[in-house]
Image (cartoon, grey):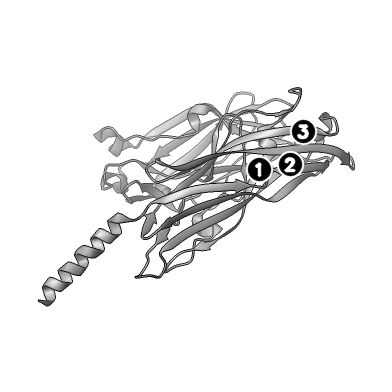
Amino acid sequence: MNKQKLFYIILLLGIYLNCFGQISYNSWVNDYLMINSFGGNTNTEAYTVNLSGNGYINIPYWRLSVRLMSPVTSADGNYTIPANKIAFRPVSTSGTAYPYNVPTISQIGMPLNVTLQEGQEIFLVPQSNAALYNFPFLFFGYYYNLQIKYSLTLLGGAYLGNYPSWTNFVAPMQFTAYDRYNNVIGRMDHYFKFQIGTLSGTPPDVPELSLKFSGNAVNGLLEFNSRNDYMNGVSTTYPSSLIVKSNTNYQIKMRSLQSQFVSQAGDTLPLETVNLALKAVSGNAATVYPVTLSTMPQLVAKGGYTQGSSVYFDITYSTGSNDQRFISAKPADYSTTLQYEITPQ
């Protein structure tokens, strides 16, 4: 009799767990930002995302993105703000979950500064290290919600002096939340407004640095298709795919935002199984430093003033030969997210 009761309870639990688990996305914005200084300005509570649901929830490796839907143009159409002058930064997380607290910014593994790029979907959460998780017990912990607040900065610089006072701009952005299988949890469009007032002070003498990728290098790919691939290793090169422009000496660092490669089924591979090397293309006098992938920021290149022009790097990803970790791994697609950062030397 006791065994029958135990089976009955487990069966009910299984039905309960499979009947719940839907998560929904919504968001809201504080959409106005006045610029009255060459130093730019920040809206500290510009964007808030809310992920909520009822009952049992377990969604690992979720993602959150932003895409600039069209250029940031003035109301009269005569002026444009470059996309890379707009940056999002995570401010805080809050919410309700059971039995654990909602994850923090560091537990999720968010980039601490995300700059927009023209025509590209940029990830505010590239692949969360913390699941959306809720495990209610009886009447406790039935409701789950996670709120993440982001600040929005329009970067300062001499470029602001190109716009007449009281010029108004609109930045149309689309935000999307995904699950681990790239299914859309939710999507919303928001419109941010910038007004350039009368600028105080003088144009600052600040470094102007630009770092971007050609389209084919946004998603790097290494494939094992034959026995020789496992024996000799594999390598993929993206020619002239990293593009840099700088008015000062610069350095480029790279790190992985996740602690390992992860498949959709949750299998993993160590980061150090993959190497990265940049190669300065002809006319680019930068110094490069090959590395193995890591969560620690690693120096991959140093260069100087680019004389007002763009310089280019080839990007090569590679693996070693006869690496048993690949040979014994389950066949699947494994991924991580790499963050490149350019700063003055």
Q: In the image, which disc is placed on residue 59?
A: none
Q: Quadrant of the N terminus?
A: bottom left
* Residue 32 visible from this viewpoint: yes
Determine the residue located farthest toward the left in the rendered image. Answer: 1
Residue in front for this viewpoint, 216 or 177: 177
Residue 175 percent coordinates (x, y): 54, 40
Kindly indicate whether the residue at mark 3 contacts the one at mark 1 (C-beta within 8 angstroms).
Answer: no
Q: Amino acid at mark 3?
A: Asn
Left-right relation of 292 to 88: left
Residue under label 1:
87
Residue under label 3:
168
| Residue at 46 percent of width and 30 percent of height | 237
Residue under label 2:
155
Residue in front for this viewpoint, 284 or 26: 26
Q: Helix, strand, or loop for circle 2? A: strand
Left-right relation of 115 to 260: right
* Residue 256 visible from this viewpoint: no
Q: Helix, strand, or loop for circle 1? A: strand
Looking at marks 2 and 1 on the same chain, the residue that comes earlier in the sequence is marked by: 1
- The answer to whether 176 is drawn above or below residue 144 in the figure is above
Looking at marks 1 and 3 on the same chain, the residue that comes earlier in the sequence is marked by: 1
Q: Nearer the viewer, mark 3 or mark 2?
A: 3
Q: Helix, strand, or loop for circle 3? A: strand
- Mark 3 Cα within 10 Å, few/some/many (few <14, many 20+)? some
Kindly indicate whether the residue at mark 1 contacts the one at mark 2 (C-beta within 8 angstroms).
Answer: yes
